[in-house]
Amino acid sequence: MADGDLPKKPALARDVNRIGNSFIFPPAVMDDIHIKSELGRYRMRGFSLFKKIPHWDDLTFLPGTLTRFVIEGYREKCETKTIIGPRAKKPIELDIPVYITGMSFGALSYEAKTALARGATMAGTATCSGEGGMIPDERRYSSKWFYQCIQSRYGFNPNHLVLADGCEFFIGQGCKVGLGGHLMGQKVTDQVAEMRSLPAGIDQRSPARHPDWLGPDDLALKIQEIREATDWQIPIQLKLGASRVYDDVRMAVKCDPDSIYIDGMEGGTGAGPHLATEDTGVPGMAAIRQARKAIDDLGKRGEITLVYAGGIRNGADVAKAIALGADAIAIGHSAMMALNCNKDIPEANYPEEVGAEPGYCYHCHTGRCPVGVATQDPKLRERLDPDAAAERVYNFLHTLTIEAQLFARACGKTYLHSLEPEDLAALTMEASAMAGVPLAGTNHTVGIADYHHL
Amino acid sequence: MASVSDAELKNMTQEERVTALGMRTEQLTGKSLYLEFDPDATENFTYPWAPDVDFNKRTELDCDGKTTTEVNSSIRALMKEGYGTVVLKNPRGMHSLGVGILSRLNLIVEGSTGYFAVGLIDGPNVRINGRVGWSCGENMMSGTILIEKNAGSTFGAAIRGGDLVCRGSVGSRTGIDQKGGTIIVGGDTGALSGFMMQRGRMVVCGNAGKNLGDSMYDGTIFVGGEIKSLGVDAIEAELTDLDKAWLTRKLTQYGLMPDKGVDHFTKVVAGKMLWNYDNLEPSEKKLIL
């Protein structure tokens, strides 16, 4: 630099001549179109929805201060006992309000299924078989176990049905409402295929409709059939994906099950079309409220249990879902994270093995799960130590419970299920409208003239 | 894949690849689902916990004035007492009759039943003298069911084993999601029969409705009469001598053998075009299968 020259300004990081960027077509959307125009079909993936929707974070608790008094946080009792199907001869009694939802053997490895079963049993709660039939060791390790009667009836066996503590009719799942399950050929090993009576290695796309009944009138008879086959002992649960929740749940109640399970659009999947994951269903906070109203309107509160699942990550989510009206909570996605999903374990090399960094992996459908959870590959499965994994599942379930208790106590409840919508406020207009609770700091519930008289 | 390199896999035969990638049952630590029976054994054809019944011990049960639950629990009680032949009188279109019987039994129903007749069974031999409603023999594991008159829709939905025979005609979606066993229809069948069929055999002596064998994964359908139309990915195949021998044996067994023999049967199988996606993304690339 010669004397007297002005120092040169560094160039701007942005191109000042550029007129703008497309909001509708950002680079990710263009990449997606490029890939699909090569592929000629929808793109598959695991995980749950990626886009932003009104979620549990948009609600907040209104704990006791002077208008309510609080329960001593770490000492006084706060009951968590949860009963599914109180009318059944043998109701399912859980020590905690959270249980492990149905995830198939096939989507998950043998080690993952048994670790979930053992962790749940340690925590005094239930598991569910999922699609694809029972693996005997899962039943052995589960103290409470739902057997799923799913559309495909893969591996459905009356000899296993009579071993169940509850029978769950799978009618839809929140992640991809109205679609059947998927299992890509990479995971259809000969064992999985044999259990499902399928040719090994096919890209399995399950039916979306039950083979032996079509509408609610038939379903009522089908429920009777399962009750006859199980001697009227165990609770029957209907699992619905959240869509027209109020009307669907009214119809479900008319079919006279013991429990209704609503799966919000936040729910996950082992494999599904990306678009179905993004663009079907209703958020949990709206679904719970509508389902609760439908059950109450038909006078079945306390008789038919309402189970909610979808997007539950921590005890605050559990407590919020219970406050909005759920009687029990099921988790799938976060339980898999307790198993190690997306964790950077020393054995795994994410970028090389699945092409994604830990924390960004949604490749369950490829069967190459680097932590041995969502795979059938024996080498990958060795990466999951079932003993340690069971311990983690237990720890996580326990944490969810004490976190939920924390909010119940703060709101002055000695029973976790005493939480009510009145204990909540919404942080956004959308959440207020969907959850039917007032916007924080106001007496205004969006869409409702007088929220005290819902 | 973690265990073997692509180069190694390329030089292997398909059989070696399957083994190298650990897709064999013995390499997977999960245990077998079923109780194993010794193929040479002549005794012990039942589960050890099944009630010990004597086929020569016969009784009648009048369903009149009873609920389905009462009838079904009476059947169980009679089996515990050792009755091996139970005759149900006056079923009068009752739903869910005789479901969930998981051991040997001769069950004779003198009349017609409603929905889900003898569903979820494993072992019994059932004869129904009348007609049946929807989903008869649903999810049956083994045994035989013989219906003398007509049957409703979704006949033998998701059956996994045994012989399910209807001498008359059946409704639509017969053998939907069939996973094994044999369905035999003496008359005609409705639309979408064999929809998403997975395994087993279905024989229709009369005509078949439209979309026969739609999206079938596997299995075989034999039709004696006209097929209105084949469904997606269902194709005609050659009727072999083995098929003819099997058809002759099965149809003779149930007294449904046509006068003109079995040479006129059309055989329908899966085209296997829907088994896999046409293309895969790089992250989904399969190394085998």
Image (cartoon, helix red, strand yellow):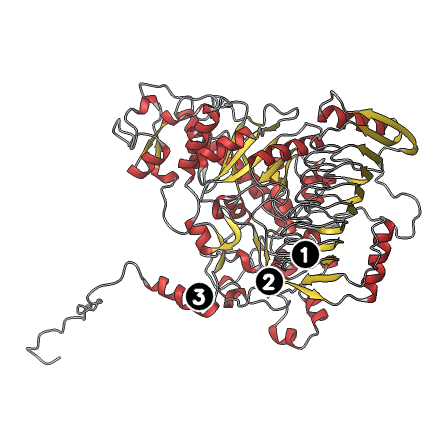
Q: Are marks 2 and 3 on the same chain?
A: no
Checking the image for residue A198, the label placed there is 1
Say few, some or many: other residues with alpha carbon within 10 Å of mark 3 (under 14 / 14 to 19 / 20 or more).
some
Q: Is residue A164 visible?
A: yes
Nearer to me, A258 or B98: B98
> What residue did someone put label 2 on?
B274
Q: Position of residue B184 (x, y in %)?
A: 77, 50
Determine the chain carrying the residue at label 2: B
Measured in 3D between alpha carbons, the distance from the residue under mark 1 to the one under mark 3, in whole angstroms, is 28 Å
Nearer to me, A144 or B199: B199
Tell me the SS state at disc 2: loop
Asked if labels 3 and 1 touch by Cβ distance under 8 angstroms, the answer is: no
Tell me the SS state at disc 3: helix
> What residue did someone put label 3 on?
A36
Q: Amino acid at mark 1?
A: Leu
Determine the chain carrying the residue at label 1: A
| Quarter where residue A66 is shown | top left
The image quadrant where one finds the C terminus of chain A is top left
